[in-house]
Image (cartoon, rainbow, N blue to C red):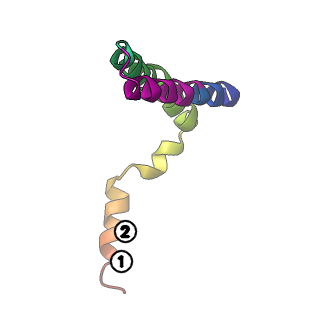
Amino acid sequence: MKLALKIMFVIFVVWMIIGAYLVNTEHEKAQIVMGLGVLYLSFLFMPLFIYYRYRDGKYKKYIINDEKLKNAFKNIGKD
């Protein structure tokens, strides 16, 4: 999966470079190429990246719950 994400990222970067070149040369299909690149990023690459990154429950340390809030408010005056 990690290799697939790296390959997909390289494809995205190359795609955007080609799109930027086409925009600078004022090619008629430049906006379509850039738009498809953004769709590729938002609907293919990012969901796979987010799934790969947080599939093992690593996101749980970023969730704020009542216990973490109580501990944070107890430590406010102790500095």
Q: Quadrant of the N terminus?
A: top right
Does residue 20 appear left or right of residue 58 in this picture? left
Instruction: Identify which amino acid the numbered label 2 is placed on.
Output: Asn
From the viewer's side, name the closer residue of 25 and 69: 25
Looking at the image, residue 3 lies above or below residue 58: above
Looking at the rendering, the stretch of residues picked out in magenta corresponds to 11-27
Res 68 → quadrant: bottom left
* The C terminus, quarter of image: bottom left
**What distance separates the C-alpha of mark 1 from that of mark 2?**
6 Å
Question: x%, y% of residue 44?
Answer: 48, 20
Question: Can you say whether 72 is above or below 60 in the image?
Answer: below
Residue bearing mark 2 = 71
Say which element carries label 1. loop
Looking at the picture, tell me which residue is in the foreground, 55 or 16.
Answer: 16
Tell me the amino acid under the disc marked 1: Asn
Please give the residue where the numbered disc 1 appears in the rendered image: 75
Percent x, y for residue 17? 50, 30
Using the rendered view, name the quadrant where residue 42 is placed.
top left
Residue 36: say if magenta.
no
Name which residue lies at 61% across and 29% down. Answer: 10
